[in-house]
Amino acid sequence: MRNKNKGKDFCMFALPGMFCFFAVVIIPFVYGVYLTLTDWNGVAKVKNFIGLENFKGVMKDGQFWTSLGLTFKYVILVVLLVNVIAFLLAYLLTRGIKGQNFFRAGFFTPNLIGGIVLGYIWQFVFSRVFVNVGEATGWKLFGVSWLSDPTKAFVALVAVSVWQLSGYMILIYVAGFMGLSEDVMEAASIDGASGWVKMKSIIMPLMMSSVTICLFLTLSRAFMVYDVNLSLTAGAPYGTTEMAAMHVYEKAFTSRQFGVGQAEAFILFIIVACISGIQVYLTKKKEVEA
Amino acid sequence: MKQTSIGGNKRKAANILATTGLVIIFLAYMFPFVMVVINSLKQKRDIIKSPFSWLYTIKGLSFDNFVKAFTQMDFLNAFKNSLIVTVSATLLVTLLAAMLAYYIVRHNNMISKITFALMVASMIIPFQAIMIPLVSIYGGTLNVLNHRLTLIFMHTGFSMAMSVFMFHGFIKGSVPIALEEAAYIDGCTRRQTFFKIVFPLLKPIISTMVILNALAFWNDFLLPSLVLTDKKLLTLPLSTYSFYGTYSADYGTIMAGLLLCVVPILILYIILQRQIISGVVAGAVK
């Protein structure tokens, strides 16, 4: 009797959720590992087992390694800039300035809007508004659209991503600053700690748990950038701003090399998993209790 | 006494400096949105000549752009599609995740442990590592792409792990088992206990999860773009994308179209600002 009830509970409470999760995440993931070992082209009924041939294909795919290198550069810049800017702004926004709630809400706005729309808005700003500023003032910097020059297009992509992500991180850092205990800060002041010393020896260590979260979020988001990349530059000019996630998409769905594309996606997954793992381990070690 | 007053002045001066800095940075942050609003009302020639001006020299201020964008994007239809998908997937994942998390917390068996471990581990898998087999299975073998239900089902599946994780933490921490035992003794069945006693207690975490999931579903582009190709089914981000592809040179219409996409979310944000912000922070910190 008891056993029967248990089975009923399981079917009613656990099964529907588990089914969705397994059908959409686990089975495709496992199947994806298998796909890396086949020569499937997306249409054919038969998939031939070809061993590690796809990984050899990845080795030969120079564009993939270029885009991976570019992604690394992009991730480093975005993660650093987002966290430094968000940390500083959050610090300013917790000093009791008038209207700070309004500022917080405003900075967060880009996060509510999809990457596609944001990318298009900025495309207009870069290709029309800035060019117009260049024409009016004669500044060479804005003379031609940033999006038509490989280096500047990359900088534009970084700038837009920093703009988009920092509002979110501001909220997390603000929550961290608000959680700092008044007593500890006051004790530090009484002990004669100056602004910089207070920041270095009191605030930073206590803020490490927020730093862990923010680094993790920015890392994983930056590595997987796709929407903004697609709508802002679409890889142009000449694929010089094509990030790894976009390259995987192109490889699979445009060039129809599903096996190689999946192998590249898998390599990307391993890289992201390792780097995030190391980051969480390293920053968690530095966390302290107040 | 004098000391404090000097300190106070210094602090005041620092605050004024900080405020000025903040206002400048804030204006820079909002600059793109201002550009969109200004130019959505202008003709193309005016936009190219001076994107900054409020003056509408050639043909004057007009709402033509909005009318054109509204019809060309098939805005109402796309909006309806987005709404159906977002609302159904959000409701579904909230209910199923709460039930699954409840089961996992209250039944400490092998299935619970394995499922939960898999879910936590799966949170690090990027979507790109799954999308190709996903298309292969659902497009090739099952042939169910191009249905709204498929997209709703996939959204539900993808947000399941994170949602269960959040519900799990909440139920473990703040739903006392004594309450359920009392309900049992009073003759409630399992189902009644869950829906009448436990589910109402989950309100705070439900509102957090609804906000996080609904935002993600509403704005998602990559997954819907793989699932839906039928023009009638396109969600708002998808229809923006195809609209932009056709009208990219018609700046005024584009700006109006982008503004149409942004405004509904902004209105919701203004109404629910407090809840959204605290929901997002709670979602990240746990």
Image (cartoon, helix red, strand yellow):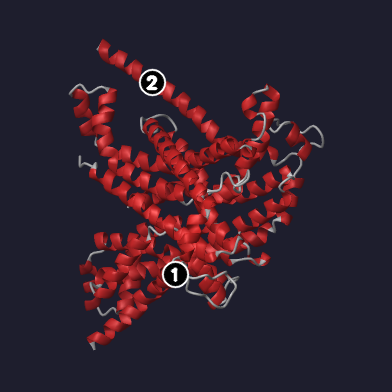
| B43 sits left or right of B128 in the view | right
Q: Nearer the viewer, mark 1 or mark 2?
A: 1
Give A44 or B229, whichever is nearer the viewer. A44
Q: Amino acid at mark 2?
A: Ala
Circles 1, 2 touching at the beta carbon (< 8 Å): no
Quarter of the image with the N terminus of chain B in it:
top left
Q: Is residue B198 visible?
A: no
Mark 2 = which residue? B14
Looking at this rendering, what residue extends furthest in the top direction? B2
Q: Is disc 1 in the same subunit as disc 2?
A: no
| B84 sits left or right of A215 in the view | right
Give A217 or A67, whichever is nearer the viewer. A67
The picture places residue A231, in percent across and down from the top left corner, at 60, 48
Dividing the picture into quarters, in which one does residue B225 lie?
bottom right
Give the letter of the chain under mark 2: B
For residue B275, the mark is none
For residue A51, the mark is 1
> Judging from the image, what secondary structure is the residue with disc 2 in?
helix
The picture places residue A246, in percent across and down from the top left corner, at 54, 53
Q: Residue at x 22, y 24 (%)?
A: A189
User: Distance between the Cα atoms at labels 1 and 2?
Assistant: 65 Å
Give the letter of the chain under mark 1: A
| B247 sits left or right of A183 in the view | right
Q: Residue at x 40, y 38 (%)?
A: A83
Q: Give the vertical position of A263 relative to B183 (above or below).
A: above
The picture places residue A27, in percent across and down from the top left corner, at 42, 72
